[in-house]
Amino acid sequence: MHFGERIKALRTTRGIGLRELARQVDLSAGYLSQLENGIAIGTPSEDTIRALAHALKTDETDLILHAGKMPTEVFDAVQGALTSGRIHRDEILSLCRRKVS
């Protein structure tokens, strides 16, 4: 299930119309429709995904990851660990490979 399908499934399960959700998160109904149908170019910003998660009463991090993005707080934690030397780049790549497999 791609990101837009997830949004549509959550929206319909919660009984929210497309135009209503678009209004709640300050998107055009056309753009939201493109997202849901997998024809939008790119993915929305993290802030927009967080707004969608809030409106759809779902976990922000889950939705951000479903969009193929890394939440800012995760990126900052990894960057801090790398910078401080608490973890090596190869260890992070190994963890990522295990998660993908």
Image (cartoon, rainbow, N blue to C red):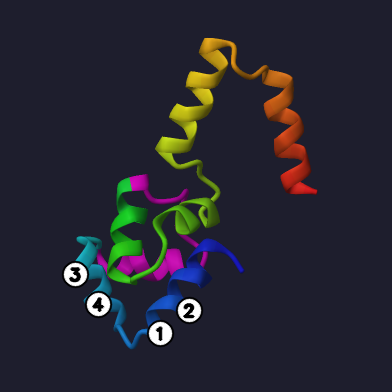
Find the distance from the CA under tag 1 to the CA under tag 3. Answer: 16 Å
Report whether 94 appears left or right of 45.
right
Residue, disc 3: 23
Q: Is residue 86 above or below residue 52?
A: above
Find the distance from the CA under tag 3 to the CA under tag 4. Answer: 6 Å
**Nearest to N terminus: mark 4 or mark 1:** 1
Q: What is the x, y in percent for residue 35? A: 43, 64
Question: Which amino acid lies under the numbered mark 3 shown in the image of this protein?
Answer: Arg
**Nearest to N terminus: mark 2 or mark 4:** 2
**Magenta segment includes 61:** no
Q: Are marks 3 and 4 in contact (CB under 8 Å)?
A: yes
Question: Which amino acid lies under the numbered mark 2 shown in the image of this protein?
Answer: Ala
Find the distance from the CA under tag 4 to the CA under tag 1. Answer: 12 Å
How many numbered marks, from 0 up? 4
Question: Which amino acid lies under the numbered mark 1 shown in the image of this protein?
Answer: Thr
Which residue is painted at 50% across and 41% down in the image?
70
**Magenta segment includes 33:** yes
The circle drawn on residue 12 is: 1
Q: Foreground mark, 3 or 2? A: 2
